[in-house]
Image (cartoon, rainbow, N blue to C red):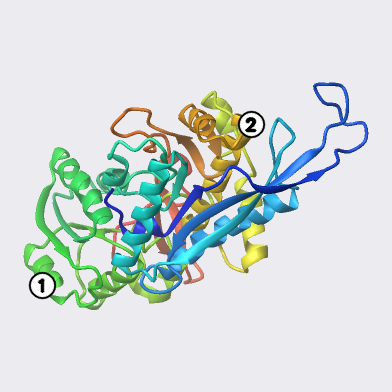
Amino acid sequence: MRPTRIVAIAIVGLVAAACGGTTTPQASGAPTSGGSAAPAVSKALNIGFTNSQTGAQQVASTKQTEGIKLWVDQVTKAGGIKLKDGTVLMPKVTFYDDGSATDRVQQLVKAAAVVSEQNGKVMITAGGADDATMEQGFTNIYQVYSPGSKYLTGAIDLMLKLDPSIKKVAIVNEKDSFSVSVVTAAKPYAESKGLQVVVNQGYDTGTTDFAPFINQIVAAAPDAIIGGGHLVDGTAFAKALKEKNVSARFVALLVAPPEPTFADIGDAANFTVGPSQWEIPVKYNEAAAKALNIPFYGITSDSFTSAYRAMFNSAPSYHSAGGFAAGLILQRALEDAGSTDPAKLRASLDKTDVMTFFGRTKFSTDAKTHGKQVAHDMVYIQWQKGSDGKLAAQVVWPTEAKTAEAQLRK
């Protein structure tokens, strides 16, 4: 496994089938298969993950962890996850701070993945979008997010629909595994569309001085810029483009733009496009699921957003939604399997094709890419100023989900 920091933001893993338990008498008159009342057994469902409580990934990681906590809170208030045999699972979370440090992340994540594989335990990743991670032939790892190879291809489609005259593109990205996997797919896709890649440069993790890259971009005079990496570097890169008055007509960056805090950089955020796994205005619902002939599971987008705001007094980001969605997928698989037995749980996840408020979820069952997400679609936001002069993140692609028309940079 080649873990990256984005993989480690939050990994939800089923650790134990039954950690002790208490017997709770079933309500009077509740039927059982034997025609008599049977006791319900409450067991702890231990869920463990690593997150970044400090360091460069702290903001995204905190949001994602909050999403997981909200799911746990709602399951707990509903009386737990109820299995067919009467067992009630009460989720409990344990997480470790990786400090956004690469060595610590690799130690924690690799250990979790290897132990999961060796012991036949199921791991559902929330935050893991690196293609390479899901191409190792694992049998127990399942990916909720769209893989990195999809992150910027849609942005290229949007760009060319917005301005077909764009011909030259600069690619500047962080040199971590996730970001590299994104541009490894985006570069040939851009070239297949007739675009010329005039800059193709990577920068080290932790870079905040983008002057050398800005100089290359200015010299090459591209029509568009794509790339980035994570929140801190992506935000710094966007600021540098504004400060140096770089005249590219279209800019799309990874991870940073969909975070609400991106607006803190003011005018530098304006017109910047970002790929997102989910946004508040996008409505995946029962009608959308019915059109695809698949089931809808869980709460609506509005219910999730309201509950999140009530619990954390802030707007959810796609990382928040991803954490909650990972919990939902685990919950549905447990209910469907009727057991915490890993083999039964894997069988349920392998046949999963469902829509939640987060979108569609389906996993690859091919040997090499087993567990890789194959159905979830990306959406693209663009920061735009409204008539009130305030910045707002608008969904601009795909067309069926947009809340505003995309605009060229000015």
57 or 245: which is nearer to us? Answer: 57
Q: Nearer the viewer, mark 1 or mark 2?
A: 2
Which quadrant, please, contains the C terminus? bottom left
- Quarter of the rendering containing residue 231: bottom left
Q: Residue at x 50, y 40 (%)?
A: 359
- Examine the rendering and report whether any part of residue 196 can be seen: yes
Instruction: State the image coordinates of residue 201 (x, y, percent, origin top left).
Output: 12, 61
Residue type (three-letter) at the residue carrying disc 1:
Asn
Image mark for residue 372: none
**Label 1, label 2: how far apart the Cα atoms are:** 59 Å
Secondary structure of residue under mark 1: helix
Out of 229 and 38, give the one closest to the viewer.
Answer: 38
Q: Position of residue 118 (x, y in %)?
A: 38, 42
Question: Which residue matches tag 1?
Answer: 215
* Relative image position of residue 122 (x, y in whole percent): 47, 41
Name the amino acid type tagged 2.
Answer: Gly
Q: Secondary structure at mark 2?
A: loop
Residue 207 in the figure: left or right of residue 68: left
Q: Residue at x 47, y 50 (%)?
A: 278
Q: Quadrant of residue 25?
A: top right
Label count reads 2
In the image as oriented, which residue stretches furthest toward the front? 20
The residue located at (71%, 38%) in the rendering is: 87
Label whose residue precedes the other's in the sequence (1 or 2): 1
- Crowding around mark 1 (Cα neighbors within 10 Å: few <14, some 14 to 19, many 20+) is few
Residue 390 in the image: state x and y as whole percent: 48, 71
**Residue toward you, 20 or 396:** 20
Residue 55, compared with residue 404, is above or below; it is: below
Question: Disc 2 marks which residue?
Answer: 338
User: In the visual, does 155 lie left or right of 293?
Assistant: left
